[in-house]
Amino acid sequence: MRCVALMRNVNQGQRGHPSTDAILAGFADAGCPDAVTFQSNGTILFDARSPETVVDAAAAAIAIRSGHERDMFWIAFQDVAAVVDRYAGVSEPRRFEFTAHRGGTIDLEDAQVVGEADRNRCELVDTGPRWALVRNRIAGEGHATPTLERITGHPATSRGLPSMVRLVLRFRSR
């Protein structure tokens, strides 16, 4: 299965962050020598029968190789592509963030979820297993990660919708 891994708080090439080489070597150590990084924010494409096992092993290997531990999440590429297909044409796409988390599927109608998002100047637009699409009230602001962390009680990480659109366009046919 083709998957997308999203590392939390990564800026490849910057001091204090895992390098691209460490990330790719970590995935190779986890049995995915053909993994590919996308952009420099810890987004990785890989193929695996057991993505959760690969991501856990890769995160551990990256921490050992780089000295920098990071949370890592995975989502099936087909799920990311489905979200992109539904939302790529929204007005003001820079307001939208695709967020990966470990909290299961979030109920969009839950009053606590709606209230927490409102307090954080955003709204949850769509959700699925381990992901949410969040619309920020103001373009350029990023409230998805802290909002999802409060809602789920677990770490999360976000990428802008335009980045996810580029990812799908680049890798859909491969």
Image: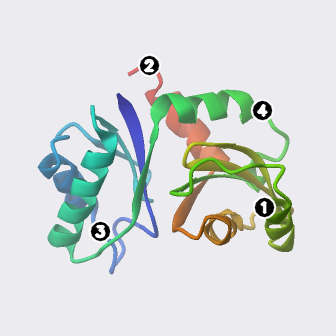
Mark nearer the N terminus (2 vs 1): 1
Closest to the camera, between mark 1 and mark 4, is 1
- How many angstroms separate mark 3 from mark 4 (CA)? 33 Å
Give the residue pinned by disc 2: 173
Point out the tag, 3 or 1, that comes first from the N-terminus.
Answer: 3
> Picture quarter containing residue 84?
top right
Tag 3: residue type? Pro
Amino acid at the residue labelled 2 = Ser
Q: Disc 2 versus disc 1: distance between alpha carbons?
A: 36 Å
Residue identified by numbered label 3? 18
Q: Earlier in the sequence, mark 2 or mark 3?
A: 3
Q: CA distance from mark 4 to mark 2?
A: 20 Å
Q: Nearer the viewer, residue 65 or 120?
A: 120
> Are the residues at dot 3 and dot 4 in contact (C-beta closer than 8 Å)?
no
Three-letter residue code for mark 4: Gly
Residue at x-position 25% and y-position 47%: 54
In percent of the image, x 53 and y 68: which residue is there?
154
Q: Earlier in the sequence, mark 3 or mark 4?
A: 3
Q: In what element is the residue under mark 4?
A: loop
> Would you name the residue on which mark 4 appears?
89
C-alpha gap between disc 2 and disc 3: 29 Å
Q: Which marked residue is nearer to the observer: mark 2 or mark 1?
A: 1
Q: Earlier in the sequence, mark 4 or mark 2?
A: 4
Q: CA distance from mark 3 to mark 1?
A: 33 Å
Instruction: State the residue position of label 1.
Output: 113
